[in-house]
Amino acid sequence: MQTQAERSDEAPPRKIDGRNLRAVATRRKIVAGARALIEEEGRVPRMADVASRADVSIRSEAVTF
């Protein structure tokens, strides 16, 4: 029988953390907001416009990207 250290082909189980889930949700909201504004306006939107559309703070957007 192999010990955990001997099984190098198996990744350790990842703990699901609420912070990680919120980070993924924030990233998705920002991307969706930016894409929608690009489609509507045909240009690269300002960070403030994307943050407003995504319902996140400008700081969250800046930290995420």
Image (cartoon, helix red, strand yellow):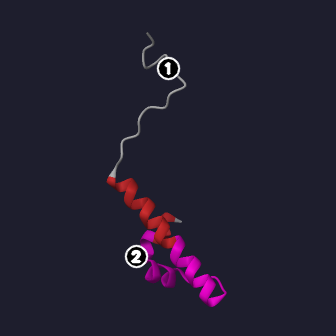
**On the image, which quarter does residue 36 sit in?**
bottom right
Please tell me how crowded label 1 is: few (under 14), some (14-19), or many (20+) other residues with Cα within 10 Å. few
Check the picture and name the quadrant holding the N terminus. Answer: top left
Give above or below for 63 relative to 37.
Answer: above
Decide whether residue 57 is among the magenta residues.
yes
Q: Secondary structure at mark 2?
A: loop
Tell me where residue 19 sits by quadrant.
bottom left
Q: Which residues are magenta?
A: 31-60
Asked whether 45 or 29 is in front, the reply is 29
Give the amino acid at mark 1. Arg
Q: Marks 1 and 2, Cα distance to the nearest angstrom?
A: 44 Å
- Percent across and percent down for residue 37 are 57, 84
> Residue 30 in the image: x percent, y percent?
49, 72
Q: Earlier in the sequence, mark 1 or mark 2?
A: 1
Please tell me the numbered disc located at residue 57: 2
Q: Residue furthest toward the right? A: 42
Which residue is tagged 1?
7
Give the answer, above or below, for where 3 lies relative to 22.
above
Q: Where residue 48 appears, x then y in whole percent? A: 48, 83
Visible in this render: residue 15? yes
Under mark 2, the amino acid is: Ser
